Amino acid sequence: MSDIGRILVADDEDTFLQATADLLRKKGYECNCASDAKTVTEMLRSTKYDLLITDINIPGNKDLELIKDLQNSPKVIPVILMTGEPFLLPAIQSVKPPVVACLIKPFDFNELLEHVKISIGR
């Protein structure tokens, strides 16, 4: 496991998913990837992660079920949500905890990295 943190990144846009994970790996984080909510849930059950970064529109996350399930999980981890749809921001912001940040795509990688550092440092 990475000394500075293990992150699960979830997005159904493969190019964005791989690019984000690669950038985080270059900063020293260990990253795994998932493209749907079912896979995220399975990975969270089988592996310890320090942070989940996920797009809200991944398959299987209708009405933010994935995040609501995480709220009730005994293994609470911080979550950074991403969306390309700014009109969803009020709904996203109402789902706390474990949501620590909501980012609108496209966002600056340094902004994401700052949220990652803060989230994993908790």
Image (tube, rainbow, N blue to C red):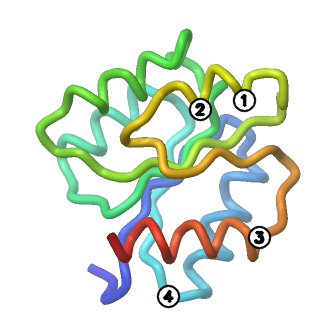
Residue 89 tag number: 1
Residue 93 tag number: 2
Quadrant the N terminus occupies: bottom left
| Neighbour tally class for label 1: few under 14, some 14-19, many 20 plus, Cα within 10 Å | some
Give the mark nearer the N terminus: 2 vs 3: 2
The answer to whether marks 4 and 1 mark residues whose Cβ atoms lie closer than 8 Å is no
Give the mark nearer the N terminus: 4 vs 1: 4
Looking at the image, residue 32 sits to the left or right of residue 84; the answer is left
Give how far apart the Cα atoms at labels 1 and 2 are.
6 Å
Residue, disc 3: 109
Secondary structure of the residue carrying numbered label 2: helix
Q: Mark 2 against mark 3, which lies toward the viewer? A: 2
Residue, disc 4: 28
The answer to whether marks 2 and 3 mark residues whose Cβ atoms lie closer than 8 Å is no
Going by the numbered disc 2, the residue's amino acid type is: Gln
The answer to whether marks 1 and 2 mark residues whose Cβ atoms lie closer than 8 Å is yes
